[in-house]
Image (cartoon, helix red, strand yellow):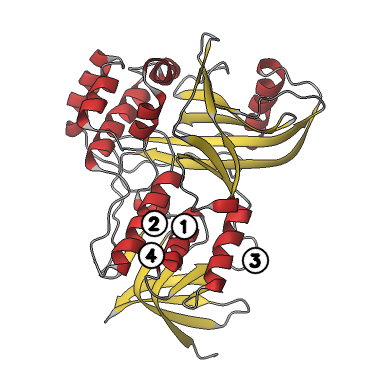
Amino acid sequence: MTPASTDTCEAAVLGGGAAGLSLAYHLARTGAGSVTLVEQPDGPLRPAERTWCYWGQDDTDLGDAVSASWSRLRVHGPDGRDVTVDPTPFTYRMVRSTPFERMVHSCLERSPAGRVLRATAVEVRDVPGGAEVRCTLPGGRPLTLRARRVFDSRPLPSLPPARTQLLQHFRGWFVHTATEEFDPMVATLMDFRVPQPSHGLAFGYVLPLAADRALVEYTEFSRAPLTTSAYEAALGHYTREILGLRAFTVGTAEQGVIPMTDARFPGRIGRAVYRIGTAGGATRPSTGYTFAAVQRQSRAIATALRDGRDTLPPPHGRRALAMDAVLLRALDTGRIDGPAFFTDLFRLTQTPRLLRFLDGATSVHEEWGIGLRTPVGPMLRTAVEVPFLSRRAHTVPRTGDTP
């Protein structure tokens, strides 16, 4: 048997997704100590290229990793009327995983205390003085990585018990049209003109990359994902019948599932082991947005470690999570009409305030004003009910395809 070798560092970050890459990047930039980013080796377990979006202001932290941005946002209501808004001082931004990974790796290479380790993390446990990660290197050789702190962003094998659990599941096409069909300045966040499912809601999503290129997605909020063939049929209907695209080609496709749940995600699972990203509760339950919360938490963790503080901030505040639990329950029970609810939020609320609300950055006074623009009766009834509901395990139904 090949003996295990041992490496050491201040912080070990497990997983090369948005959360792992972001935390490693901010740790290296702040000089919070030596950092090792543990990523899966090349092979079937390494994820395909992904797209992440968020709204931001004038920060330039992500530089060239931002591949596109939009200065106007559009929502199409189920009645066919649209609302187009100016989100200033925010812009909506797209980050593709490949250039983001390249930027983070370059930052770690320039840092005297940063590195990327291609290995499979097999076991994580607390040990005196920190934690250790037992890894398997390409070729099968074992390696033990010891660190003062370990941040684990790997997906959970199952979601924790919840009162309400929905899924945001989607498939998208990168399309190239024969003629100019898109306004490169306007991102369509929600297009509710698509047929609605019997439970939950569905919408189209269009991110123009040029006048003749765009990422077009079909998305549902519901309890179970679809088969790939069902997504393909929905995308075909949306692109041809609703967007009116005729001559176009599909380059690549993306497909995924994001949990929308009021489950409790422990941020700390040992004396020196923490969870980050979706596994640590960074996904906003009511919207599925994760990337902006990951950036905020990564900056805060890096600053705390640099300053010698051991208390690390959660990704979302308690008030925001409480409001999300009510909205999820109201959507799941059908007490509110999801398409009308989200459309009215954009029609009746100042856009910068709404975006800050969706990021959990508004005051109680601002949230009260937004709440009065929602269906007050059904929301109050749900708010009274939610605290008395028990949390239980939810099984995600399988489809014939793997999203």
Residues packed near mark 1 inside 10 Å, few (<14), some (14 to 19) or many (20 plus):
many
Choose the circle earlier in sequence order: 4 or 3.
3
Choose the circle earlier in sequence order: 2 or 1.
1
Q: Is residue 283 above or below residue 7?
A: above
Q: Is residue 154 left or right of residue 375?
A: right
- Along the line of sight, the residue nearer the viewer: 68 or 344: 68
Q: CA distance from mark 4 to mark 3?
A: 21 Å
Q: Are marks 2 and 1 in contact (CB under 8 Å)?
A: yes
User: Under tag 1, what secondary structure?
Assistant: helix
Screen quadrant of the C terminus? top right
Spot occupied by residue 327 in the image (x, y as percentages of width and height): 32, 27
Q: CA distance from mark 1 to mark 3?
A: 20 Å
Mark 3 = which residue? Answer: 42
Choose the circle earlier in sequence order: 3 or 2.
3
Which mark is in front, 1 or 3? 1
Spot occupied by residue 108 in the image (x, y as percentages of width and height): 52, 70
Q: Is residue 34 above or below residue 274?
A: below
Which mark is in front, 3 or 2? 2
Mark 4 = which residue? Answer: 151
Spot occupied by residue 401 in the image (x, y as percentages of width and height): 61, 42
Choose the circle earlier in sequence order: 1 or 3.
1
Q: Amino acid at mark 1?
A: Ser
Q: Is residue 346 above or below residue 255?
A: above
Residues packed near mark 3 inside 10 Å, few (<14), some (14 to 19) or many (20 plus):
few
Mark 1 = which residue? Answer: 22
Mark 2 = which residue? Answer: 298
The numbered mark at residue 134 is: none
- Along the line of sight, the residue nearer the viewer: 37 or 279: 37
Residue at 39% over, 20% down: 345
Q: Is residue 74 above or below residue 18?
A: above
